[in-house]
Image (tube, rainbow, N blue to C red):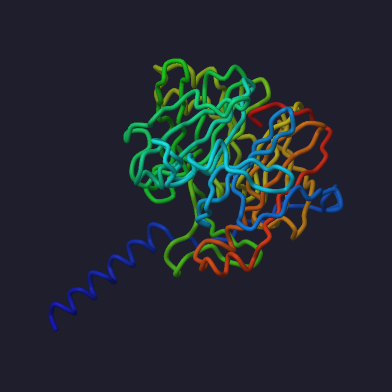
Amino acid sequence: MKKLTFLCVIVALATLFIWWRYAETGHFPDLTTAPIWSEDKLELVAELPTPPGNVAVNQDGRVFLTLHPEARPEFNVVELVDGEVIPFPSAEWQPDGIQEKSFQEVLSIRIDQQNRLWALDTGSHGIGQPRLLAFDLSSGALVHEYDFPSSIFGLGSHANDFQVSPDGLYLYISDASILAKTPALIVYSVEKRESRRILENDASVKSGHYEPVVQGRPMTVAGIFTINPGVDGIALSRDGETLFYASVSGDMLYKLPTRHLKYAQANNKILAGFVEPVGRKTMTDGMTTDNQNNVYLTDIEHSAIIRMNDQGERTTLLKTDKLRWPDGFSFGPDGYLYITNSALHEVIGRLPSDVKKQAPYPVYRIKTDQEAVSGH
Protein backbone atom coordinates (compact mmCIF):
# COMPACT_ATOMS: atom_id res chain seq x y z
CA MET A 1 0.00 0.00 0.00
CA LYS A 2 2.87 2.40 0.84
CA LYS A 3 4.49 1.71 -2.52
CA LEU A 4 1.20 2.40 -4.30
CA THR A 5 0.71 5.65 -2.39
CA PHE A 6 4.26 6.73 -3.19
CA LEU A 7 3.72 5.94 -6.90
CA CYS A 8 0.50 7.96 -6.93
CA VAL A 9 2.33 10.93 -5.41
CA ILE A 10 5.08 10.70 -8.03
CA VAL A 11 2.53 10.53 -10.87
CA ALA A 12 0.62 13.48 -9.42
CA LEU A 13 3.79 15.56 -9.08
CA ALA A 14 4.89 14.66 -12.60
CA THR A 15 1.47 15.62 -13.99
CA LEU A 16 1.57 18.90 -12.08
CA PHE A 17 5.04 19.66 -13.46
CA ILE A 18 3.97 18.94 -17.06
CA TRP A 19 0.88 21.13 -16.62
CA TRP A 20 2.99 23.96 -15.15
CA ARG A 21 5.56 23.75 -17.97
CA TYR A 22 3.37 22.98 -20.97
CA ALA A 23 -0.22 24.14 -20.36
CA GLU A 24 -1.55 27.57 -21.29
CA THR A 25 -4.96 29.09 -20.65
CA GLY A 26 -4.72 32.65 -21.96
CA HIS A 27 -6.95 33.77 -24.84
CA PHE A 28 -5.31 35.55 -27.77
CA PRO A 29 -7.04 38.79 -28.80
CA ASP A 30 -8.87 38.88 -32.12
CA LEU A 31 -6.91 41.33 -34.29
CA THR A 32 -8.76 40.63 -37.53
CA THR A 33 -11.05 43.14 -39.22
CA ALA A 34 -13.50 42.89 -42.09
CA PRO A 35 -11.67 41.16 -44.99
CA ILE A 36 -11.03 43.11 -48.17
CA TRP A 37 -11.18 39.98 -50.36
CA SER A 38 -14.17 37.74 -50.88
CA GLU A 39 -13.71 34.01 -50.31
CA ASP A 40 -14.73 33.64 -53.95
CA LYS A 41 -11.14 34.66 -54.79
CA LEU A 42 -9.96 31.32 -53.41
CA GLU A 43 -9.20 28.79 -56.13
CA LEU A 44 -9.12 25.10 -55.28
CA VAL A 45 -5.83 23.54 -56.37
CA ALA A 46 -6.32 20.05 -54.94
CA GLU A 47 -8.26 18.02 -52.41
CA LEU A 48 -6.10 15.55 -50.55
CA PRO A 49 -6.96 12.45 -48.51
CA THR A 50 -4.46 13.49 -45.82
CA PRO A 51 -3.53 16.96 -44.51
CA PRO A 52 -0.82 18.93 -46.30
CA GLY A 53 1.96 20.61 -44.33
CA ASN A 54 4.01 23.04 -46.39
CA VAL A 55 4.01 24.02 -50.06
CA ALA A 56 6.68 25.13 -52.51
CA VAL A 57 5.99 26.28 -56.07
CA ASN A 58 8.72 26.91 -58.62
CA GLN A 59 8.70 29.50 -61.41
CA ASP A 60 7.47 26.89 -63.89
CA GLY A 61 4.39 26.29 -61.75
CA ARG A 62 5.37 22.88 -60.41
CA VAL A 63 3.71 22.38 -57.01
CA PHE A 64 5.42 20.41 -54.24
CA LEU A 65 3.94 19.58 -50.85
CA THR A 66 4.75 17.90 -47.61
CA LEU A 67 1.99 15.67 -46.29
CA HIS A 68 1.83 16.54 -42.62
CA PRO A 69 3.82 14.07 -40.49
CA GLU A 70 1.27 14.32 -37.66
CA ALA A 71 -1.19 12.36 -39.84
CA ARG A 72 1.40 9.60 -40.50
CA PRO A 73 0.91 9.52 -44.29
CA GLU A 74 2.44 6.92 -46.58
CA PHE A 75 4.36 9.62 -48.47
CA ASN A 76 6.00 12.66 -46.89
CA VAL A 77 7.27 14.84 -49.77
CA VAL A 78 5.24 14.84 -52.99
CA GLU A 79 4.68 16.66 -56.25
CA LEU A 80 1.14 17.55 -57.23
CA VAL A 81 0.49 16.34 -60.78
CA ASP A 82 -3.02 16.62 -62.26
CA GLY A 83 -4.48 16.74 -58.78
CA GLU A 84 -2.69 13.58 -57.66
CA VAL A 85 0.27 13.27 -55.28
CA ILE A 86 3.43 11.66 -56.67
CA PRO A 87 6.26 10.86 -54.22
CA PHE A 88 9.26 13.15 -54.72
CA PRO A 89 11.98 12.51 -55.65
CA SER A 90 10.85 8.86 -55.55
CA ALA A 91 9.09 6.33 -53.36
CA GLU A 92 12.50 5.13 -52.16
CA TRP A 93 13.07 8.47 -50.40
CA GLN A 94 9.83 8.33 -48.39
CA PRO A 95 9.77 7.27 -44.69
CA ASP A 96 11.16 3.75 -44.28
CA GLY A 97 12.34 3.83 -47.90
CA ILE A 98 15.45 2.05 -49.10
CA GLN A 99 17.52 5.21 -49.57
CA GLU A 100 20.21 5.54 -46.91
CA LYS A 101 18.94 8.97 -45.80
CA SER A 102 15.28 8.54 -46.59
CA PHE A 103 12.90 11.04 -45.01
CA GLN A 104 12.09 10.61 -41.34
CA GLU A 105 9.75 13.56 -40.78
CA VAL A 106 9.84 16.46 -43.23
CA LEU A 107 7.50 19.36 -42.52
CA SER A 108 9.05 22.29 -44.37
CA ILE A 109 10.27 22.50 -47.99
CA ARG A 110 11.52 25.47 -50.03
CA ILE A 111 12.63 26.00 -53.62
CA ASP A 112 15.56 28.35 -54.10
CA GLN A 113 16.49 30.49 -57.08
CA GLN A 114 18.97 27.80 -58.15
CA ASN A 115 16.02 25.45 -58.82
CA ARG A 116 16.79 23.19 -55.89
CA LEU A 117 14.15 21.83 -53.57
CA TRP A 118 15.36 21.87 -49.96
CA ALA A 119 13.76 19.54 -47.41
CA LEU A 120 14.20 20.09 -43.68
CA ASP A 121 13.95 16.80 -41.81
CA THR A 122 13.06 17.26 -38.13
CA GLY A 123 14.37 13.81 -37.22
CA SER A 124 11.15 13.38 -35.20
CA HIS A 125 11.91 16.07 -32.61
CA GLY A 126 15.57 15.10 -32.51
CA ILE A 127 14.92 11.46 -31.66
CA GLY A 128 16.39 10.62 -35.06
CA GLN A 129 18.84 12.67 -37.12
CA PRO A 130 17.73 16.19 -38.09
CA ARG A 131 19.14 17.06 -41.50
CA LEU A 132 18.95 19.14 -44.65
CA LEU A 133 18.57 17.59 -48.10
CA ALA A 134 18.55 19.44 -51.42
CA PHE A 135 17.40 18.01 -54.73
CA ASP A 136 17.89 19.34 -58.24
CA LEU A 137 14.42 19.83 -59.69
CA SER A 138 15.51 19.08 -63.25
CA SER A 139 16.85 15.62 -62.43
CA GLY A 140 15.58 14.82 -58.94
CA ALA A 141 19.16 14.09 -57.89
CA LEU A 142 20.38 14.75 -54.37
CA VAL A 143 22.85 17.65 -54.61
CA HIS A 144 23.42 18.63 -50.97
CA GLU A 145 23.07 16.99 -47.58
CA TYR A 146 23.94 17.99 -44.05
CA ASP A 147 23.37 16.27 -40.70
CA PHE A 148 22.89 18.71 -37.84
CA PRO A 149 24.93 18.00 -34.69
CA SER A 150 22.99 17.52 -31.46
CA SER A 151 24.28 20.88 -30.24
CA ILE A 152 22.16 22.52 -32.96
CA PHE A 153 19.07 20.29 -33.01
CA GLY A 154 19.01 18.08 -29.94
CA LEU A 155 16.40 15.91 -28.28
CA GLY A 156 13.08 17.76 -28.03
CA SER A 157 13.94 20.19 -30.82
CA HIS A 158 11.65 20.87 -33.75
CA ALA A 159 13.25 21.99 -37.03
CA ASN A 160 10.07 23.68 -38.12
CA ASP A 161 10.48 26.13 -40.99
CA PHE A 162 13.20 27.87 -43.01
CA GLN A 163 14.08 30.27 -45.79
CA VAL A 164 16.88 30.29 -48.37
CA SER A 165 18.84 33.42 -49.28
CA PRO A 166 18.48 34.61 -52.91
CA ASP A 167 22.06 33.55 -53.69
CA GLY A 168 21.40 30.09 -52.24
CA LEU A 169 24.32 30.38 -49.81
CA TYR A 170 22.48 30.67 -46.48
CA LEU A 171 19.50 29.04 -44.83
CA TYR A 172 17.68 30.55 -41.86
CA ILE A 173 15.80 27.98 -39.77
CA SER A 174 13.44 28.07 -36.80
CA ASP A 175 13.63 25.61 -33.93
CA ALA A 176 10.13 25.74 -32.46
CA SER A 177 11.29 23.42 -29.67
CA ILE A 178 7.81 22.50 -28.54
CA LEU A 179 9.14 19.77 -26.22
CA ALA A 180 12.55 21.00 -25.05
CA LYS A 181 11.29 24.60 -24.66
CA THR A 182 14.59 26.07 -25.89
CA PRO A 183 13.47 27.86 -29.07
CA ALA A 184 16.14 29.42 -31.28
CA LEU A 185 17.11 30.40 -34.80
CA ILE A 186 19.72 28.51 -36.80
CA VAL A 187 21.96 29.91 -39.53
CA TYR A 188 23.38 27.45 -42.03
CA SER A 189 26.19 28.21 -44.49
CA VAL A 190 25.87 26.04 -47.61
CA GLU A 191 29.46 26.64 -48.76
CA LYS A 192 31.07 26.10 -45.35
CA ARG A 193 28.63 23.35 -44.33
CA GLU A 194 28.45 24.95 -40.89
CA SER A 195 25.45 25.67 -38.67
CA ARG A 196 25.12 28.08 -35.76
CA ARG A 197 22.40 28.27 -33.11
CA ILE A 198 21.48 31.84 -32.18
CA LEU A 199 19.10 33.79 -29.94
CA GLU A 200 18.15 30.72 -27.92
CA ASN A 201 15.40 31.68 -25.45
CA ASP A 202 15.56 35.32 -26.50
CA ALA A 203 12.28 37.11 -25.84
CA SER A 204 11.68 37.34 -29.59
CA VAL A 205 11.67 33.54 -30.08
CA LYS A 206 9.69 32.45 -27.01
CA SER A 207 6.07 31.34 -27.20
CA GLY A 208 3.35 33.55 -25.78
CA HIS A 209 1.18 32.51 -22.86
CA TYR A 210 -1.86 31.76 -24.98
CA GLU A 211 -3.80 28.61 -25.81
CA PRO A 212 -4.69 28.31 -29.50
CA VAL A 213 -8.39 27.71 -30.10
CA VAL A 214 -8.97 26.67 -33.71
CA GLN A 215 -12.49 26.44 -35.13
CA GLY A 216 -13.81 25.85 -31.63
CA ARG A 217 -11.21 23.32 -30.45
CA PRO A 218 -8.81 24.31 -27.63
CA MET A 219 -5.38 22.95 -28.53
CA THR A 220 -4.52 21.45 -25.14
CA VAL A 221 -4.09 17.70 -25.04
CA ALA A 222 -5.40 15.85 -21.95
CA GLY A 223 -5.65 19.17 -20.15
CA ILE A 224 -1.90 19.32 -19.53
CA PHE A 225 -0.07 19.89 -22.85
CA THR A 226 -0.81 22.93 -25.01
CA ILE A 227 0.28 22.90 -28.65
CA ASN A 228 2.26 26.09 -28.22
CA PRO A 229 5.62 26.11 -30.04
CA GLY A 230 8.28 28.78 -29.85
CA VAL A 231 9.58 30.56 -32.95
CA ASP A 232 7.76 28.98 -35.85
CA GLY A 233 6.98 31.11 -38.88
CA ILE A 234 9.97 32.62 -40.66
CA ALA A 235 10.13 34.77 -43.80
CA LEU A 236 12.78 36.56 -45.82
CA SER A 237 12.49 39.85 -47.69
CA ARG A 238 12.77 39.49 -51.46
CA ASP A 239 16.24 41.06 -51.45
CA GLY A 240 17.34 38.67 -48.71
CA GLU A 241 18.40 41.48 -46.39
CA THR A 242 15.74 41.16 -43.68
CA LEU A 243 14.59 38.09 -41.76
CA PHE A 244 11.10 38.14 -40.22
CA TYR A 245 10.08 35.64 -37.56
CA ALA A 246 7.66 34.97 -34.71
CA SER A 247 6.27 32.26 -32.46
CA VAL A 248 2.75 31.01 -33.09
CA SER A 249 1.24 32.53 -29.95
CA GLY A 250 3.63 35.45 -29.60
CA ASP A 251 1.85 38.74 -30.17
CA MET A 252 4.70 40.46 -32.02
CA LEU A 253 6.41 40.03 -35.38
CA TYR A 254 10.16 40.66 -35.28
CA LYS A 255 12.82 41.40 -37.88
CA LEU A 256 16.59 41.16 -38.00
CA PRO A 257 19.09 42.27 -40.71
CA THR A 258 20.64 39.17 -42.25
CA ARG A 259 24.07 40.84 -42.64
CA HIS A 260 24.54 40.36 -38.91
CA LEU A 261 23.55 36.70 -39.11
CA LYS A 262 26.32 35.97 -41.62
CA TYR A 263 28.96 37.26 -39.21
CA ALA A 264 30.03 34.09 -37.43
CA GLN A 265 31.54 35.91 -34.44
CA ALA A 266 28.33 37.75 -33.58
CA ASN A 267 27.15 36.41 -30.21
CA ASN A 268 23.60 36.39 -28.89
CA LYS A 269 24.03 39.64 -26.95
CA ILE A 270 25.17 41.44 -30.08
CA LEU A 271 22.45 39.92 -32.26
CA ALA A 272 19.69 40.68 -29.74
CA GLY A 273 20.62 44.34 -30.06
CA PHE A 274 19.66 44.28 -33.74
CA VAL A 275 16.26 42.63 -33.26
CA GLU A 276 13.39 45.03 -33.95
CA PRO A 277 9.63 44.61 -33.48
CA VAL A 278 7.59 45.17 -36.63
CA GLY A 279 4.09 45.17 -35.19
CA ARG A 280 1.44 43.23 -33.30
CA LYS A 281 0.41 40.10 -35.11
CA THR A 282 -2.25 37.43 -35.04
CA MET A 283 -1.99 33.79 -33.89
CA THR A 284 0.29 32.92 -36.79
CA ASP A 285 1.71 29.75 -38.31
CA GLY A 286 2.97 30.35 -41.86
CA MET A 287 4.33 33.58 -43.32
CA THR A 288 5.85 34.95 -46.51
CA THR A 289 6.76 38.29 -48.12
CA ASP A 290 6.05 40.20 -51.34
CA ASN A 291 7.81 42.78 -53.50
CA GLN A 292 6.60 45.69 -51.38
CA ASN A 293 8.15 44.23 -48.20
CA ASN A 294 4.74 43.28 -46.87
CA VAL A 295 4.58 40.18 -44.69
CA TYR A 296 1.68 37.76 -45.17
CA LEU A 297 0.58 35.97 -41.99
CA THR A 298 -1.88 33.18 -41.38
CA ASP A 299 -4.34 33.53 -38.50
CA ILE A 300 -5.10 29.98 -37.41
CA GLU A 301 -7.69 30.99 -34.81
CA HIS A 302 -9.84 33.06 -37.16
CA SER A 303 -9.25 31.21 -40.44
CA ALA A 304 -7.76 34.34 -41.95
CA ILE A 305 -4.86 35.74 -43.96
CA ILE A 306 -3.33 39.00 -42.80
CA ARG A 307 -0.94 41.37 -44.58
CA MET A 308 1.37 43.57 -42.51
CA ASN A 309 3.32 46.44 -44.04
CA ASP A 310 6.76 47.60 -42.93
CA GLN A 311 5.13 50.07 -40.53
CA GLY A 312 3.42 47.24 -38.67
CA GLU A 313 -0.05 48.07 -40.01
CA ARG A 314 -2.33 45.06 -40.55
CA THR A 315 -4.90 44.40 -43.26
CA THR A 316 -7.22 41.39 -43.13
CA LEU A 317 -7.21 40.04 -46.68
CA LEU A 318 -9.36 36.96 -46.32
CA LYS A 319 -11.45 35.35 -43.61
CA THR A 320 -13.36 32.13 -44.23
CA ASP A 321 -14.03 28.79 -42.55
CA LYS A 322 -12.68 27.16 -45.70
CA LEU A 323 -9.23 27.83 -44.24
CA ARG A 324 -8.79 24.97 -41.77
CA TRP A 325 -5.63 25.91 -39.88
CA PRO A 326 -3.98 27.83 -42.75
CA ASP A 327 -0.37 26.71 -42.52
CA GLY A 328 2.06 27.03 -45.44
CA PHE A 329 2.52 29.76 -48.06
CA SER A 330 4.32 29.87 -51.40
CA PHE A 331 4.13 32.41 -54.18
CA GLY A 332 3.86 30.85 -57.62
CA PRO A 333 3.74 32.25 -61.16
CA ASP A 334 1.21 34.86 -62.31
CA GLY A 335 0.77 36.43 -58.88
CA TYR A 336 -0.77 33.41 -57.17
CA LEU A 337 -0.26 32.74 -53.46
CA TYR A 338 -0.63 29.04 -52.61
CA ILE A 339 -2.01 28.10 -49.18
CA THR A 340 -2.07 24.75 -47.40
CA ASN A 341 -4.59 23.78 -44.74
CA SER A 342 -3.01 21.38 -42.28
CA ALA A 343 -6.18 21.14 -40.17
CA LEU A 344 -4.08 20.21 -37.14
CA HIS A 345 -7.06 20.75 -34.84
CA GLU A 346 -8.62 17.77 -36.65
CA VAL A 347 -5.43 15.69 -36.53
CA ILE A 348 -3.58 16.08 -33.22
CA GLY A 349 -4.95 13.74 -30.59
CA ARG A 350 -7.34 12.13 -33.08
CA LEU A 351 -7.53 8.53 -34.24
CA PRO A 352 -6.48 7.82 -37.85
CA SER A 353 -10.07 6.91 -38.64
CA ASP A 354 -11.22 10.34 -37.40
CA VAL A 355 -8.57 12.08 -39.52
CA LYS A 356 -9.75 10.14 -42.56
CA LYS A 357 -13.35 11.19 -41.92
CA GLN A 358 -12.39 14.88 -42.11
CA ALA A 359 -11.01 14.49 -45.64
CA PRO A 360 -10.66 15.96 -48.18
CA TYR A 361 -8.02 18.47 -47.11
CA PRO A 362 -7.76 21.38 -49.55
CA VAL A 363 -4.87 23.28 -51.06
CA TYR A 364 -5.88 26.71 -52.33
CA ARG A 365 -4.38 29.56 -54.26
CA ILE A 366 -5.40 33.19 -54.49
CA LYS A 367 -4.48 35.93 -56.97
CA THR A 368 -2.45 38.73 -55.35
CA ASP A 369 -0.80 40.32 -58.42
CA GLN A 370 2.62 39.66 -56.90
CA GLU A 371 5.42 38.12 -58.94
CA ALA A 372 6.78 34.71 -58.01
CA VAL A 373 10.19 34.50 -56.38
CA SER A 374 11.56 31.08 -55.49
CA GLY A 375 12.06 30.51 -51.78
CA HIS A 376 8.90 32.38 -50.76
Q: Where is residue 142? Give x, y as percent.
A: 50, 27
Is residue 214 positioned above or below 107 on the image? Answer: below
Image-quadrant location for residue 354: bottom right
Residue at the extreme bottom: 1
- Is 285 left or right of 31, judged from the image as shown? left
Q: Where is residue 189? Give x, y as percent.
A: 46, 20
> Where's the C terminus, which quadrant?
top right
> Where's the N terminus, which quadrant?
bottom left
Q: Where is residue 203? Give x, y as percent.
A: 47, 40
Q: Where is residue 291? Give x, y as percent.
A: 75, 26
Is residue 200 positioned above or below 283 on the image? Answer: above
Image-quadrant location for residue 296: top right
Of residues 171 and 22, the one drawn nearer to the viewer in this rendering: 171
Of residues 301 and 253, the one drawn nearer to the viewer in this rendering: 301
Q: Residue at x 46, y 41 (%)?
A: 103
- Is 323 left or right of 104, judged from the image as shown? right
Q: Residue at x 67, y 27 (%)?
A: 374
Q: Residue at x 38, y 57 (%)?
A: 21
